[in-house]
Amino acid sequence: MNVERILDLQEKAQREPLTEKEAYDLAVALGGGPITEPQKDYIELLLDQTGNDLDEYTNVPLDELTLNEASEIIDAIKEDLDGFH
């Protein structure tokens, strides 16, 4: 989604309720959408490699993470992996 569309949706949201699809698209564009299956799989793979548990990085269940939270956790786990090598 381009910046213009994001701004349009933000302006519309101030005037009237967004449709469910518009609200979802805006949330995803702003990084607040739900975690994707590939992100879940990657986090689980990285956790297996470190031997760590998800609760060492967050108290939010894997299925409830946002895109931004998942990305931050992936970065943190990768930093821990770099420390192992």
Image (spheres, helix red, strand yellow):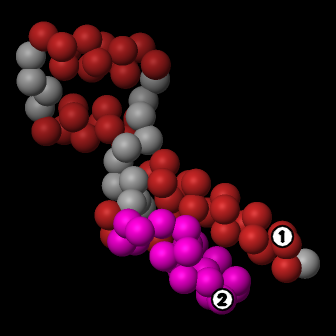
Q: Which residue is mark 2?
A: 51
Q: Earlier in the sequence, mark 1 or mark 2?
A: 2
Closer to the camera, 24 or 78?
A: 78
Judging by the rendered image, the residue that carries numbered circle 1 is 82
Name the secondary structure under disc 2: loop
**Number of other residues with Cα within 10 Å of mark 1, as a class: few under 14, some 14 to 19, many 20 or more:** few
Residue 45 badge: none
Q: Quadrant of residue 11?
A: top left
Question: What secondary structure predominates along the stretch shown in magenta?
Answer: helix
Q: Nearer the viewer, residue 21 or 47?
A: 47
What is the x, y in percent for residue 71?
56, 55
Look at the image and give the residue range highlighted in magenta: 42-62
Say what amino acid the circle numbered 1 marks: Asp
Residue type indicated by callout 2: Gly
Q: Position of residue 31 (x, y in %)?
A: 44, 41
Q: Secondary structure at mark 1?
A: helix
> Which residue is at a point 72% across and 67% down the rendered structure image?
78
Residue drawn at (57%, 62%) of the image? 73
Locate the C terminus and report the quarter of the image it occupies. bottom right
Locate residue 3 relative to residue 71 in the image: left or right.
left
